[in-house]
Each structure stands twice: as C-alpha cells, then as structure tokens.
C-alpha cells in the first residue's frame, strides 16, 4: 500500500471509528458499598458545604457605609489643681463633629495663662547648664519646650537651665491625676447613626431600624440581651464589653473599636438583615512603653491689655473607632451553575476510588483485574490487524 493510501486510511479510522466503553458489572457488596458511600460523600459535600455553608449559589457584594455619632452627658470636676468646672459635650468631645471616629476626653494636664515670652527650660540632661556657654542661641530641639535664647538662667534656687522662647509657663506633664479627671465619662452615651448600601442589590438600610420611633430613641439604651436594636450605647458598657475597666482606660487613654457587622443573606427565604455589634480594644495595652493615647490642644484668649494668652491642655482620652464591614449574598443563576458544576465534577472521581478499592482491597482482585484490563492474545491481535484493513478493502 502506498503512503498516501495508508494516510487516507488512518484519517478514515479517526473520523468514522466508533468507540464505546465496556461496562463491567461487579456483583460485590463491598465494592458496591464503597461506590455508594463515595457518591453520598460527594453529594453531602455539594449540598452541605457548597450550598448550605458556602452559599456558593449566591452573588455577593461588599458594604458601603456612612457613620455619624453624637455623644451626650455631663460631668463636674472639683480638684485642688483646678477651679470647679462643669463639662458638657462641647468641652470633652474633640473635634465636636462626630464621624466614624470620636474622642472623649477623660483625663488631662492643664497649663493655664500661658503667654509668648522667655522662661527657663524644664530641667533635664540636655537643658541644665552652668553658664551661657552651655546654651546655643536658636537651638530648636523638637524634644525641648522652645527655641533657646543662649542664656543660662535660674530654674530654681539650686538648678540652672537654658532659657527658651516659648509659651510660658511651660507645661509640666508629670503631674497626671491618678484618678481620671472626667471619671463620670463612663456614664456618657453615644448615638451611632449608620447607613449602609449594597449597590449591586440596591439594598439600603440604617441601624435605626424601621420599627424604631422617636420616643423609643429618647429612652432606649443598647443591651445585647434586652435591647439589641437600640443604637444608643453607654460608654462604660462599650469598654466593659472589651474586657477592660473604664476607669483604667480613662487614666492614660486608649482606642476602642465598635464593630458593626452587616453580613446579610438577602434571599427572601433567609432571615432579616440586622446589624450585629461587637467591641474590641484596638491599642496594645500590654506594653508599658508609651501606653495610652494623648494629644495637645489650646484655647486662646486676650487679656484686658490685649495680649494673647492661652490654656494648653494635654488631653488623655478614649478614641472610639466605628468599623463597619459586611458582605451580602443573593441567589444568582451564574454562580449557581458554575459552582454546582465544579462541585459535581467530583462525582467523576467516584469510579476511580471504587476501581482502586476493587483492585487492591478485595479477595478476588486478580479476577477483577483480568476482567478489567484485557491483554490481547496474539490471535486476537492478528484478527484485529486484518479487520484494520477493512476501509482499504471495501
Ligand atoms: N448620645 C445620646 N444619648 C442619648 N440620646 C441621644 C444621644 N444622641 C441623640 N440622642 C437622642 O436621639 C434622638 C435623635 O437624635 P438626633 O441627633 O438625630 O436629633 P436632635 O433632635 O438633633 O438631638 P438633640 O437636639 O437632642 O441633640 C434625639 O431624641 C436625641 O435626643
């Protein structure tokens, strides 16, 4: 036969030979049991894990959120270091406009009647001096209190320090009150207004749920067991939910996270979509180096003589960060087909498992092996060869 004829014959075989798998029926209880068990496991995986747990039939979307907060409460302080003072929200919330993060002042070091003038630096290894040669004119040390004038002056009857141009008298922040000044802040309350959207599903909701009315809002307070829908939280409760004591945190400050979880199943057969609140301390309280949270701000006045004066406040307090997260899911035909198809493809592994069991774990494995794997005898091979020329002879 010429090469071209042989090539044509191969093509004909390729195009028109019909292949069909041979079915081998094994009447063996063990193999049948393994077969059904493996099928059952695959079906359980598809129904239980893929459908029920993973909800792979759903399309998902991430939450978009806006948060506003409003704190309320009063405090009265009367200490030896300070005049008696009444505090309301405008005094202790910094800045006054509440968004997803608000700061409540709980403790402070107040330095009153500061004016821009010259005064001796606070004593320290780099500020004490013997004479003017120890001080450098214009030295501006960020860790100092001002710009050095180059003079060495008396700080007290025994200590001399370099003079600085600064807001004087200088702040002495080593005298932090041992009990938080605004201990009463634990009874302040905060209203959290949180609106969320899942744009893909055109789903909008607030944490002030539809059944909440104005009169209820005037008297309710959040409690996970008795009033989980109320968006008004007592600060003491928030801090205690993190496992901390409010007064301990109030002393040097800290950062507390108010976490709102809006994970929702939006299918009509699932439950309603509600916010779930949880509370965590976010700063590291276990380190003694640089603990807590503080910053400085000042209130400015004019003296009757028209001179600028200010009260400097080193503010210690608790920053509350409202963190909103969530993913919503809703039935979608595309993920259903894709994920179900992918999961059901595991069924094709079932015969492989059964074959392995049949050929390795059964007593009749040799017989099954002979039946499953057919080695052609020489006669049969010759017969097939002669049949192989069928296209050529017809
Ligand atoms: N931190 C809070 N603690 C308790 N109730 C609050 C708090 N913040 C707001 N509320 C109450 O929740 C309701 C809605 O507050 P919202 O700020 O929307 O209205 P408002 O009339 O401007 O509030 P208000 O004038 O009392 O500050 C009001 O009845 C308000 O008194």
Image: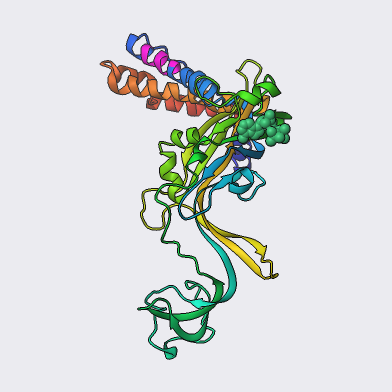
> In the image, residue 296 lies at what x, y percent?
55, 59
The image shows residue 381 at horizontal and vertical percentages of 43, 27
Q: Position of residue 390 (x, y in %)?
A: 58, 26
Is residue 12 shown in magenta?
A: no
Left or right: 276, with 205 as reference point = left
Query: Can residue 46 be seen from the camera position used here?
Result: yes
Work out whether 385 lies above or below 162.
above
232 or 379: nearer the viewer: 232
As displayed, is residue 63 above or below residue 266? below
In the picture, the quarter occupied by the N terminus is: top right
- For the question of whether residue 197 can be seen, the reply is no
Up the image or down, 176 lies above or below 17; here it is below
Residue stretch rendered in magenta on the structure: 33-40
| Farthest bottom residue in view | 133
Q: Residue at x 39, y 23 (%)?
A: 353
Q: Quadrant of ligand 1?
A: top right
Magenta stretch holds residue 35: yes
Q: How is the image coloured?
A: rainbow
The dominant secondary structure in magenta is: helix
Tell me: residue 267, above or below residue 168: above
Q: To which quarter of the image does residue 197 belong?
A: top right
Judging depth in this view, the residue of 338 and 374 nearest the camera is 338
| Residue 12, quarter of the rendered image | top right
Viewer-proximal residue, 60 or 166? Answer: 166
Residue at 50% across, 87% down: 150
């Amino acid at each position: 036969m010429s090469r071209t004829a042989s090539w044509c014959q191969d093509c004909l075989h390729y195009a028109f030979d019909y292949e069909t798998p041979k079915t081998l029926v094994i009447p063996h209880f063990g193999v049948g049991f393994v077969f059904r068990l493996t099928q059952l496991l695959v079906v359980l995986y598809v129904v239980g894990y893929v459908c029920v747990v993973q909800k792979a039939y759903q399309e998902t979307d991430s939450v978009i959120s806006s948060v506003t907060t409003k704190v309320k409460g009063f405090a009265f302080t009367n200490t030896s270091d300070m005049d008696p003072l009444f505090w309301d929200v405008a005094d202790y919330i910094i800045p006054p406009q509440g968004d997803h993060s608000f700061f409540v002042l709980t403790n402070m070091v107040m330095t009153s009647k500061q004016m821009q003038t010259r005064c001796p630096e606070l004593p320290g290894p780099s500020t004490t001096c013997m004479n003017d040669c120890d001080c450098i004119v214009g030295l501006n040390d960020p860790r100092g209190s001002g710009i050095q004038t180059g003079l060495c002056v008396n700080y007290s009857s025994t200590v001399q320090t370099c003079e600085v141009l600064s807001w004087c008298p200088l702040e002495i922040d080593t005298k932090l009150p041992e009990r938080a000044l605004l201990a009463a802040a634990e009874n302040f309350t905060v209203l959290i207004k949180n609106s969320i959207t899942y744009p893909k599903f055109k789903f909008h909701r607030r944490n002030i749920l539809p059944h909440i009315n104005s009169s209820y809002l005037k008297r309710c307070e959040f409690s996970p067991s008795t009033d989980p829908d109320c968006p008004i939280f007592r600060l003491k409760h928030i801090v205690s939910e993190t496992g901390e004591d409010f007064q301990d945190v109030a002393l040097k400050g800290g950062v507390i996270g108010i976490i709102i979880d809006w994970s929702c199943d939006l299918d009509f057969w699932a439950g309603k979509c509600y916010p779930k609140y949880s509370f965590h301390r976010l700063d590291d309280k276990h380190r003694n180096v640089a603990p807590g949270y503080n910053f400085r701000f000042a209130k400015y006045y004019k003296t009757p003589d028209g001179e600028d004066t200010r009260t400097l406040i080193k503010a210690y307090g608790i920053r509350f960060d409202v963190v909103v997260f969530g993913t919503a899911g809703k039935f979608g035909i595309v993920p259903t087909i894709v994920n179900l198809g992918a999961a059901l493809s595991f069924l094709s592994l079932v015969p492989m498992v059964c074959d392995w069991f049949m050929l390795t774990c059964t007593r009749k494995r040799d017989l099954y092996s002979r039946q499953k794997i057919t080695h052609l005898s020489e006669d049969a091979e010759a017969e097939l060869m002669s049949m192989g020329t069928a296209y050529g002879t017809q």
